[in-house]
Image (spheres, grey):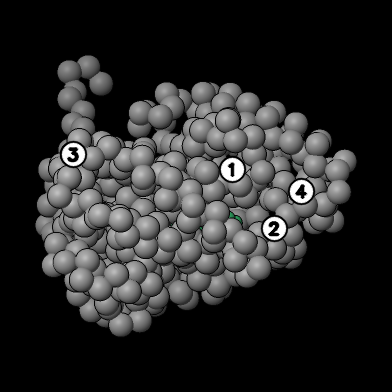
Amino acid sequence: MDGMIVEKRDYLAEDPWTLPLEQMDVGRSILFQHDAFWDHFARLRRDCPVHYCGVGEFGNYWSITKYKDIMKIEANHDVFSSDVSMGGITLRDQLEDFVLPMFIAMDPPVHDAQRAAVQPIVAPENLARLEGLIRSRAAEILDNLPIGETFNWVDKVSIELTTQMLATLFDFPWEDRRKLTRWSDVGTATPGGGIIEDDEQRKVELLECLQYFLGLWNERVNAPPKGDLISLMAHNEATRHQTPMEYLGNLLLLIVGGNDTTRNSITGGLYALNKFPDQYTKLLANPGLVRNMVPEIIRWQTPLAHMRRTATQDFVFEGKQIRKGDRVVMWYVSGNRDEEVISNPNELIIDRERSGRHLSFGFGLHRCLGERLADMQLRIIWEEILARFGRIEVVEEPKRVFSSFVKGYEVLNVRIPADQVRKR
Ligand code: HEM
């Protein structure tokens, strides 16, 4: 290879409208970090809605980009499996020497039994019990925000509220709750993206997480059953015999599920309202729109950009020959902008009709377990924000996460002007 110059692709400089289809690789983390993927998906929806990428960062994969096609894949779990032994539910395969089984990455019947074990956490009576608690915590967080100064909304509001909630769901030692934030970040981080250096570091930190939670398990398994997630698992036939790695897998599922997603919706909502100031004006004039706005924010943000399945057999889908073992990636972020199903999909419209029609929570038997809890947290935080403040200003573009799975923000600098604080 002496003297041969191997050119590195500059993904951000490429024009997705002229790039040959066989070179398109929409799953590159860098495109997400720079919010530069929208036209890539628009091109695929127009020219090649079921697209094969043979040059992927994490291996080859099919992209499913249209709303209705995503629903078809979700509904066919015999052919499109979630099972961890086939690679799991993200574009990037799980590490072979560090496999974490978890019920989101299982097929029936084990999936169904384990899901049922933790389902009581989102039962209506439990949610009703949590509502007052979330409201008082949201109030405390908001009442302590600096006025007239620039601060990072992600850290001071979104992370704080969702981490407190997570600590409650696990009945986790309160003073150590930021450990949950760290494990959530480590659980989904792409090596080299600023959170972890390499996969070795991930293993070490996640094993610390397991160690910590094993202590809590031993406490709960020997005590009478309670309503927290650890006790629910420790006292249910479907989960009480799980291996330590399965326990760690399910913990990570619940930590990431309950944390990153809601966190990025809280941040994404404020960012979106600043991008669409007429919508912010509409909201300030009519705070009753919050209920309709919350699902619209979740659609617009799409906190998990994709879920992946693996083909269990050769299968022809929409005229394309998918082979047994192929990765099939359902891009919710693209389905949610599919103009055939959602009008003006790139815009945030807080009084949109049928705002709940979106793919952000998935579809079918893996549909998000925490949907109602997320919805409630977002509704409460917005009700409490509107009771205290007028327009909160985003002062610069956010710093985004380096990932094509978790679509979110590391930093969103904002300012609450003194004249926007309501007299109470
Ligand atoms: C806006 C917030 C949230 C979003 C966008 C979201 C998104 C998702 C998505 C896309 C899936 C996979 C769906 C599929 O494969 O069809 C999922 C599954 C799941 N989510 Fe959420 N989620 C959110 C909040 C939460 C919360 C607060 C919890 C807390 C407990 C949670 C727990 C779970 C669990 C346990 C699963 C696995 C369900 C299964 O495999 O049966 N999520 N979520």
Amino acid type, label 1? Ala
Note whether ligand 1 is within 8 Å of mark 2. yes
Pointer 1 or 2: first along the chain: 2
* Front label number (1 vs 2): 1
Callout 1 crowding tier (Cα within 10 Å): few <14, some 14–19, many ≥20: many
User: Real-space Cα distance between discs 3 and 4?
Assistant: 44 Å
**Whether residue 292 is visible:** yes
Tag of residue 118: 2
In this rendering, the answer to whether 123 lies above or below 214 is: below
Report the disc number at residue 231. 4
Foreground residue, 197 or 129?
129
Tell me if label 3 and label 4 are in contact, CB under 8 Å.
no
Expressed as whole percent of the image width and height from the top left, the position of residue 168 reads 61, 47
How far separated are the C-alphas under marks 1 and 2?
15 Å
In-image side of 392 versus 221 (left or right): left
Residue type at tag 4:
Ser
Mark 3, Cα crowd under 10 Å, few <14 / some 14-19 / many 20+, is: some
